Amino acid sequence: MNEIEKMLLMQIADLHKVPDGAYNIRKDGDGDGRRSTPHIRIENRTDGKSGIDIFVSSQTQNESVHIPVVITKSDYREKVYNDFYVEAGADVLIIAGCGIHNCGAQTSEHSGVHTFHVGKSARVRYVEKHYGEGDGRGGNIMNPDTVIYLEEGASMLMETTQIKGIDSTMRTTKAIVAAGADLVVKEKIYTHGTQFAGTDFTVELNGEGAGADVVSRSVAADHSKQKFASRIIGNAACNGHTECDAIIMDEAQVVAVPELTANSVDAQLIHEAAIGKIAGEQITKLMTLGLTESEAEEQIIRGFLN
């Protein structure tokens, strides 16, 4: 693996070497390394679609699996399907993400469909980072679709980050949450230039005690555009919360569309949305400590997104 590919892996998966535990590394459409473990098995799909199936046994406790994707070709597009089957009682960390290095004049695109089947009382933490770079004129596009099925008592924490360099992204997440199960989503996005980022969440809370907390934090700079849509549907005695908190700068545009539907008198649902600029007094305070105005803005943005 060359230095560019190593750098991409570090950006999207914090990998400086071959990871411990199970992993599958995909590079320009081909496999570039795979390892299963006694508790986590990775196999090629058998339905003709590009992608893998990951099987996490009930004996899995505090183990991890890495499935990063690296693209270094210009004028390259792919769609990958990865399915996760997490057995009851398992506890696993899944680290995904895609990095694109495009130095050509054509567009490179990665679209992924990740489907999670999480068994009773299982615990999943899913970390996904997207990153793009390149000194060419070609665009970097990523369109991740995530489908989540949480059985009774299961829990999933989903942390997604768009670091930089992605010219267009449409992120779609759909979740079905059973009784006593809990979904937490923490999304962080930064756009600049003329980039576009759209996110669309739909969560159905279908059982007593089901819960969801969907929070998006974003910064839109220059002439970039963002759109956040979130729907929580309460079909039982459940608790749901959705929040969009955005900083808007320069000539950017941000649209927030939270939506709640209660189909039960015992559904407790809350939505929040806030869009605003960086307060002048925040910048002034940091400048008194010796920072320039641009350094102060950068510091505020970093703290907001962390």
Image: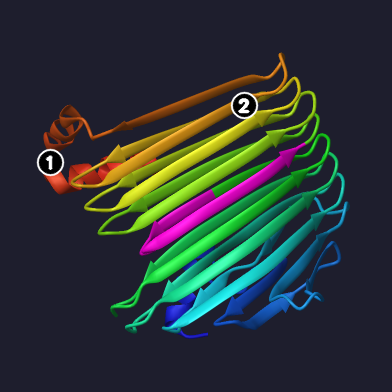
Q: Which element carries disc 2, helix, strand or loop?
A: strand
Which of the two discs, 1 and 2, labels the residue nearer the N terminus?
Answer: 2
* Residue 60 point in image, percent of width and height: 82, 54
Q: Which element carries disc 1, helix, strand or loop?
A: loop
Report the magenta stretch's main SS: strand
Instruction: Report the colour scheme.
Output: rainbow
Q: Which residues are magenta?
A: 160-177
Is residue 231 placed above or below 4 in the rendered structure?
above
Residue carrying label 2? 261
| Location of residue 20 (image quadrant) | bottom right
* Residue 259 point in image, percent of width and height: 53, 30
- Toward the viewer: 266 or 104? 266
* Residue 97 point in image, percent of width and height: 55, 63
- Other residues around mark 1 within 10 Å, as few (<14) / some (14–19) / many (≥20): few
- Toward the viewer: 165 or 258? 258
Point out the frontmost of discs 1 and 2. 2
Is residue 61 placed above or below 289 in the rendered structure?
below
Is residue 301 placed above or below 179 in the rendered structure?
below
Where does the C terminus fall, quadrant-wise? top left
| Location of residue 281 (image quadrant) | top left
Residue carrying label 1? 290
- Other residues around mark 2 within 10 Å, as few (<14) / some (14–19) / many (≥20): few
Which amino acid, by three-letter code, is at mark 1? Gly
Distance (Cα) linking label 1 and label 2: 49 Å
Please report contact status of discs 1 and 2: CB closer than 8 Å, yes or no.
Answer: no
At horizontal 85% and vertical 61% (from top left) the residue drawn is: 39
At horizontal 44% and vertical 55% (from top left) the residue drawn is: 162
| Whether residue 208 is visible | yes
Which amino acid, by three-letter code, is at mark 2? Thr
Q: Residue furthest top?
A: 265
Circle number at residue 235: none
| Whether residue 9 is visible | no
